[in-house]
Amino acid sequence: MTECAHAEARWELATDEDGWACDCGKLGFRPDLDAELIEEKVGAVLFWLAHHDVVSVSNGTTGDYIVANVAQAARKAGRYDQYTIVSLILSDPNLAGHAEYWAKRSAEWLDAEREGRGHEKPVDQVLRESGMRSLFEGVF
Ligand SMILES: [Zn+2]
């Protein structure tokens, strides 16, 4: 029987950075895999953030770009821990604009509230709720 090369190793979230696992068993803390398979680790963290509605990744291609950007930045910094990965994900250009967008929406809502106007739904929210958002991706 040949020894497993852990080519299919996956990252299971772990604040102690010991989340590497493979079909052959639990691998735990593996800085060698952190560096070799950083895309896998970043992908797992990004998936969790998106799955739990912490961030919105509009499609798989965008997700791939984020993973590639973050993996490259992690390698450049020589940091492969989850905190660094989360920080790099949140500062990725593909997710930029979220804070500004919501600051603007909040200001509009507060203005309408103060002036006793109704709260109009922005066009992109109407489209999203009607399932049309994906057709207009990148427009807003
Ligand atoms: Zn293995």
Image: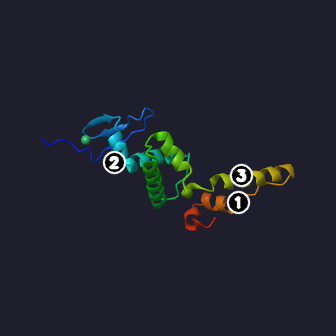
Looking at the image, which residue is at 45% across and 43% down? 79
Q: Which quadrant of the picture is home to ligand 1? A: top left
Farthest left residue in view: 1
Q: Going from the N terminus, do you reach mark 3 or mark 1 first?
A: 3
Residue tagged 2: 36
Circle 2 — which element? Answer: helix
Identify the residue at image location x=37%, y=43%. Answer: 34
Residue displayed at 18% across by 41% down: 3
- Foreground: 66 or 31? 31
Task: Tell me where residue 64 appears, x and y as whole percent.
Answer: 44, 57
Q: Secondary structure at mark 3?
A: helix
Residue position marked by numbered label 1 in the rendering: 122
Where does the image place residue 121, in percent across and percent down from the top left?
72, 57
Q: Nearer the viewer, mark 2 or mark 3?
A: 2
**Foreground: 78 or 25?**
78
| Mark 2 in CB contact with mark 3 (< 8 angstroms) | no
Q: How is the image coloured?
A: rainbow
Residue 114 pos. (x, y %): 85, 49
For this orientation, the residue located farthest to the right is: 115
CA distance separating discs 2 and 3: 39 Å
Label 3 beta carbon within 8 A of ligand 1: no
The spot of residue 117 in percent (x, y) is: 84, 54
Instruction: Point out the tag, 1 or 2, that comes first from the N-terminus.
Output: 2
First reached walking from the N terminus: tag 2 or tag 3: 2
Q: Secondary structure at mark 1?
A: loop
Q: Which mark is residue 135?
A: none
Which callout, 1 or 2, points to the residue nearer the camera?
2
- Residue at label 3? 103
Image quarter of the N terminus: top left
Please tell me how crowded label 1 is: few (under 14), some (14-19), or many (20+) other residues with Cα within 10 Å: few
